[in-house]
């Protein structure tokens, strides 16, 4: 029993000296080490807290966080919406009566994107939409810190068509289709 | 009439000191807990989180007074008051500096131990009056712990009183420094009355008092329900033990009582074992350091520094050692500390008769 008491006392002192060591080394902060360095796995001393947002850990430019769509390059093929496992992309297309223009990599655009909404709250950051996009207009950026007070603010709208333009294009399409019908009936 | 004014002012001064100390101690505890765990603790409210406890107290003060419908109203509402008052009254006999003590009772130490024991009744009232099985369990364990650990604590104190031959706290403090009336023998051999400093402290005058201090320190940790003996208020075990049903100002009183008791038992330990308000520095030849650093202001300074270091040690222990199970706790008390305290009491008696006579 004396041995147990002595062991208890000795180990308590050892524990207290360990905590005291940590207490006294809390004046230094642990440093960000480069993974290529040899001493990357050596145990560091000091506090580990990073006071976000006053301080933050740097992330690479090629980090895969929030999605961004370059709408001028989009040919509205709907592949990203189909590939998304959580259906966070909603696209509505309006057929154009003739070729509208070209994307930056040479594909011809024949569809207007009336609605291109991505719900960032649903997005699971899998990146499948970026894999299937034929023109690489949808990419993952390294932006991760966007908070909004309303959940609906997290639905990003990438389409740049105004209501008036959408109506106008729909009218154009209806007119074109009506003319084609008329031409077919006449023939 | 003037004579009552002094008493009222002293009581108010003590209360404001205790309230201020609690604010500081809670902040210190959270910061120390953070640093020990390699993190920062509160940082947002005030510079380095210093106003955190003020924010907590304001929150507690403005909460609603809820009493559970089947709770015993008298017991429930008076429990926190009794616990706090018992602890607060213990400060009446504590010496802060030469000539500065609210009351230099001849029975000082006996009075303090007796009044702190009243806290156990308050704990029992809180647990039973809450009409909550877990609160009751917590309070029963708490009371069992408090009354069991009073035995080794009391025996340890008797061991000291045999050496000091007085229960008067102010006299005990005086006899450990340069202002002493009697001879002070360092380790029983060397007369250090004119040298003072840490050589004159009780733990160095009579070396087995170091063991006695260890016993008293452990027993007092258990009295405060402080980890590693915090089974009654273990957050992961019994929610909050006997103060589960309390919120707002009543909870603030329990909280205040816990920190005040920590300070009180540390201060008792300091006065009895570590020289009280006496200085740490000895007189070395013509550098009369002990004489220069003893006095009213210096006395308050030394006693505060020593007590705050002991409180800091209590906080460090809380964040280091794992909690003891109830049976391990009782085992420690009855089978280890009590026999050891008896042994030390015997050694004190022998020492007093042979060496100090």
Image (cartoon, rainbow, N blue to C red):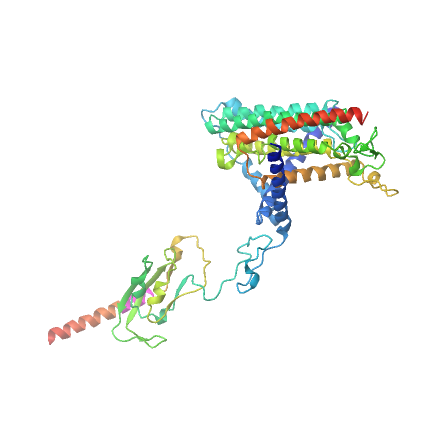
Quarter of the image for the N terminus of chain A: give it. top right
Q: Nearer the viewer, residue B6 or B105?
A: B105
**Direction from residue B333 to residue B2 in the image, left or right:** right
Q: In which quarter of the image is residue B249?
A: top right
User: Residue B304 in the image: x percent, y percent?
Assistant: 71, 38
Q: Is the magenta stretch mostly helix, strand or loop?
A: helix
Relative to B270, residue A56 above or below: below
Q: How many labels does the image show?
A: 0
Write the start and end of the magenta stretch as one range.
Answer: A162-169
**Direction from residue B271 to residue B328 in the image, left or right:** left
Q: Quadrant of residue B330?
A: top right
Relative to A109, residue A31 above or below: above
Quarter of the image for the C terminus of chain A: give it. bottom left
Q: Tell whether position A166 is magenta.
A: yes
Which residue sits at x=52%, y=35%?
Answer: B234
Q: Which of B333 and B123 is in front in this view?
A: B333
Q: Tell whether position B161 is magenta.
A: no
Can residue A31 be seen here? The reply is yes
**Direction from residue B196 to residue A18 in the image, left or right:** left
User: Residue A60 in the image: x percent, y percent?
Assistant: 48, 65
Which residue sits at x=61%, y=38%?
Answer: A7
Q: Nearer the viewer, residue A106 or B163?
A: B163
Which residue sits at x=36%, y=55%?
Answer: A122
**Direction from residue B316 to residue B93 in the image, left or right:** right
User: Residue B152 in the image: x percent, y percent?
Assistant: 64, 27
User: Residue B325 in the image: x percent, y percent?
Assistant: 53, 33
Seen as rendered, the residue at the extreme right is B286
Relative to A64, residue B276 above or below: above
Can residue B16 be seen here? The reply is no
């Amino acid at each position: 029993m004396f041995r147990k008491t002595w062991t208890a006392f000795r180990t308590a002192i050892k524990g207290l000296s360990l905590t005291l060591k940590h207490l006294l080394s809390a004046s230094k902060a642990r440093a960000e080490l480069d993974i290529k360095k040899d001493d990357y796995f050596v145990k560091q001393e000091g506090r580990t807290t990073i006071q976000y947002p006053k301080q933050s850990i740097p992330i690479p430019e090629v980090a895969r966080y929030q999605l961004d769509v370059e709408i001028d390059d989009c040919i509205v093929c709907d592949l990203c919406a189909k590939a998304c496992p959580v259906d966070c992309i909603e696209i509505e297309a309006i057929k154009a009566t003739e070729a509208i223009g070209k994307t930056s990599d040479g594909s011809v655009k024949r569809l207007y994107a009336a609605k291109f909404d991505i719900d960032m709250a649903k997005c699971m950051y899998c990146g499948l939409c970026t894999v299937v996009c034929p023109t690489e207009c949808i990419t993952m950026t390294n932006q991760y810190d966007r908070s909004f007070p309303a959940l609906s603010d997290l639905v990003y709208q990438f389409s740049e068509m105004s209501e008036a333009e959408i109506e106008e294009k729909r009218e154009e399409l209806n007119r074109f289709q009506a003319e084609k019908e008329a031409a077919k009936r006449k023939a | 009439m003037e004579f009552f004014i002094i008493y009222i002012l002293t009581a108010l001064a003590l209360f404001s000191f205790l309230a201020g100390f609690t604010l500081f101690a809670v902040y210190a505890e959270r910061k120390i807990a953070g640093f020990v765990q390699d993190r920062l603790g509160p940082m947002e409210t005030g510079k380095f989180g210093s106003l955190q406890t003020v924010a907590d107290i304001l929150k507690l003060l403005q909460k609603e007074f809820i009493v559970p419908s089947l709770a015993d109203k008298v017991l429930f509402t008076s429990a926190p008051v009794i616990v706090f008052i018992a602890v607060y009254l213990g400060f009446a006999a504590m010496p802060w500096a030469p000539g500065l003590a609210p009351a230099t009772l001849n029975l000082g130490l006996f009075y303090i131990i007796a009044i702190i024991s009243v806290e156990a009744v308050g704990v029992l009232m809180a647990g039973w009056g809450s009409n909550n099985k877990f609160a009751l369990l917590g309070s029963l364990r708490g009371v069992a712990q408090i009354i069991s650990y009073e035995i080794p604590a009391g025996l340890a104190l008797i061991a000291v009183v045999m050496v000091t031959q007085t229960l008067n706290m102010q006299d005990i403090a005086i006899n450990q420094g340069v202002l002493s009336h009697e001879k002070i023998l360092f380790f029983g051999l060397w007369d250090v009355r004119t040298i003072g400093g840490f050589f004159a402290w009780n733990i160095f005058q009579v070396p087995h008092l170091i063991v006695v201090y260890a016993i008293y320190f452990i027993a007092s940790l258990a009295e405060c329900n402080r980890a590693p003996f915090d089974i009654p208020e273990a957050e992961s075990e019994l929610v909050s033990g006997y103060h589960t049903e309390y919120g707002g100002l009543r909870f603030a009183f329990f909280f205040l009582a816990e920190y005040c008791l920590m300070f009180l038992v540390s201060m008792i330990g300091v006065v009895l074992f570590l020289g009280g308000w006496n200085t740490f520095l000895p007189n070395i030849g013509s550098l009369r350091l002990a004489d220069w650093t003893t006095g009213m202001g210096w006395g308050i300074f030394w006693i505060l520094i020593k007590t705050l270091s002991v409180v800091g040690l209590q906080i460090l222990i809380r964040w280091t050692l794992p909690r003891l199970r109830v049976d391990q706790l009782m085992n420690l008390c009855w089978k280890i500390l009590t026999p050891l305290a008896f042994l030390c009491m015997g050694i004190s008696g022998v020492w007093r008769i042979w060496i100090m006579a």
